[in-house]
Amino acid sequence: MSAERDIAPVTSACGDGDDCCAAPAVATSLSGPASGAGVVTFRVEELDCATEEQQLRAVLAPLDGVRTLEFDLVGRRVRVRHDLPSAEPIEAAIRELGMRPATVVETEDAPLQRGLPRRAIATMVAAGVLAIGAEVAVIAGVDEQSLPIALVSVAAIALGGRDTLRKAVQAVRSRRMTMSLLMTVAVIGAIAIGQWPEAAVVIWLFGVAELIEALSLERARNAIRSLVALAPETATVRRNDAWVTVATGEVALGEVVLVKPGERIALDGHVVSGSSTVNQAPITGESIPVAKESGDPVFAGTINERGTLEVTVTAAKGEGTLDRIACSIQEAQADKAPAQRFVDRFAAVYTPAVFVLAIVVAVLPVVTGHGSFRDWFYRALVLLVIACPCALVISTPVTVVAGLGGAARRGILIKGGVHLENARKLRTIALDKTGTLTHGTPALTDLINLGPLDDAEILRIAASIEARSEHPVAHAIVTAHHGPIADVDGFEAITGRGVRASVDGVTYTLGNHRLVEETGVCTPDLEQLLERLEREAKTAIVLMNAEPLAILAVADTLRPTARQAVADLTALGVSTVMLTGDNQRTATAIATEAGISDARGDLLPDDKLRIVTELVAAGGHVGMVGDGVNDAPALARADLGIAMGAAGTDTAIETADIALMDDDPRKIAETIRISTHTAHVLWQNITVALGVKAVFFVLTMTGTASLWLAVLADMGASLVVIANGLRLLRRPAHGTRATPRSDHTTTVAVG
């Protein structure tokens, strides 16, 4: 079965001799920079695969004034940068190939296809009636070489094999050995020996296989394009003190849109009024809705669940987080996995070798006197059909794009097949502590009462004083107090030590360990309490007047999911080490709480880079997990860079190999599981594809296989590998636990 028609949504897994599609949006620079050049984008419905792409390159690249060519086989588009006065010469060159270009605007999206075109179905039904009718007539006793049978068969071939024959002609023109050419040669050979009905049935089955394959592969294509389709086409915008409904493409930056309960948010923005919970699963993969209030970011395509929100638009249509994710997945397909590169190399040799072998099978036995020419020529034709590498070349790209799409549904954006496959090989991962294992912002963790005031009064006094400060510790104390604050007089900042102010006519001091000692109120018991809190990586602040009244401890707390994340990695055979810029005492405390046995503190970015470099040199694949900015040197040096909490962050999405769209560190282990599962499916598909070829090679050489049976077997193998690959699009049940891997041990460095 041909892979050439509908591999458009996925990267080519073919070599030069194959007919399946190449990666989308791959630019080829032809001459110098493209600054000042015009840009034209054509949608070419015939642009299905690598054959058409190479033909377009051959005619467009030599044109004077053409700068660069970019091919998007997902959307069947070619984008041309040029210095020509108009795009007419470009369009004319495309039409000379028999293709039908249509100019499109850059922001126009290819429509989602939910089924097969009715015309295509009707054509195949008609071809099937004719082909099967001719075969039945022959079985009933009509001479298969009679004129009526020949005419009916020709009609069936013309209807059912039109696309196949057209692509075979294109292959001859471009001097490429493609699957359509192999099939066409087999059909012509069958006609040459008088097998008219069988030739018609073979090419009809081949066409049916393409249609079924197209419907299956559309799921992979839609897995990408449906991301963008989640965002509604219209938005309710406030204009001239009234709410009006307009197309999202007409909404300008800074305008305010209204989102009612149950509606999808149309564009990225920030909440300016209202509060609600928003289902962010399309972006982050989070199963639990997130509370949103004034100042919080929201993303296009997410669902407002309860309250009404007014949102200021921060990204125009086509430029939001959802669009960047979809674009990144499409571009990721160009980065082939190792298994795909293996199939590329294999298929580039396989198809021509099969053609040569078929010639040998047709000629050698006859020359050596071991059978009739008609018998061995027929077997050679069967060999051409069954050897068609369709299932093989389909197996890897479908599996990879399904793996990428399935990961995206879980909020894991993987920037290429190579990264998808290599994640399972990681032996060392470096994780940034702040914002990765911890929340990244300090919070009040302890309130130890030392005097006559109750806890609520202590917190009221401390929050009233700290409300005047912008220090993160002060913010944590103020945030912890939920009641009204008191009036404060005589506020004074004590540099590097604390603050002092009067509340309700009483002067209080909030100071650190050093200030407590300098004031002479640090008793042995208080000293012991302060040292214990500091060992727990907490910043201790003492509230005093004439004597200590309370200790308030603040810390960047561990995420609730962090310990589970480490446990999941351990279950996968992953050991852990922490790399952090915090002091060693803090590093040890956080690492112990997270279940990490090895912690290294007091590290500058260069120190992290040095350690990652040492880990790489020590052997094994090394990953780095950070925020995509501060840890950029280590992220770049690692074999795999992973950005945490990348939703809405351009830098993280663009620079990391893998971006986790929410702040859940458990998805690090999930990424490894997805990678492992994808690799298993890849090799399952390759084994099935090659296994079917091997079995039918034996059947062909023994004379027990027929042309139509060979097509059915090839179609069956292709559908099996497609269905197996598309399983990766399914979302596993919540709470799936990691299972140990036996291939190697992985080390995770956390920083």
Image (cartoon, rainbow, N blue to C red):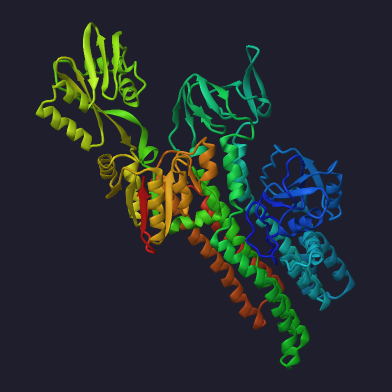
* Residue 428 place in picture, x, y as percent: 39, 55
Q: Nearer the viewer, residue 638 or 734?
A: 638
Q: Is residue 572 visible?
A: yes
Q: Is residue 427 left or right of residue 83?
A: left
Q: Is residue 620 left or right of residue 260?
A: left
* Residue 563 place in picture, x, y as percent: 31, 44
In this view, the residue farthest toward the bottom is 369
Q: Residue at x 27, y 21 (%)?
A: 498
151 vs 595: above or below? below
Q: Is residue 732 visible?
A: no
Q: Nearer the viewer, residue 573 or 242?
A: 573
611 vs 158: above or below? above
Q: Quadrant of residue 1?
A: bottom right
Q: Residue at x 75, y 66 (%)?
A: 203
* Residue 333 place in picture, x, y as percent: 60, 52
Q: Nearer the viewer, residue 446 or 545?
A: 545
Q: Quadrant of residue 397?
A: bottom right
User: On the rendered image, what quadrant is the C terminus found in?
Assistant: top left
710 vs 338: above or below? below
Q: Residue at x 47, y 21 (%)?
A: 294
In this view, the residue farthest toward the left is 524
| Badge count | 0
Q: Is residue 729 left or right of residue 532?
A: right
In this view, the residue farthest toward the right is 147
Q: Residue at x 23, y 26 (%)?
A: 512
60 vs 199: above or below? above
* Residue 238 place in picture, x, y as percent: 62, 17
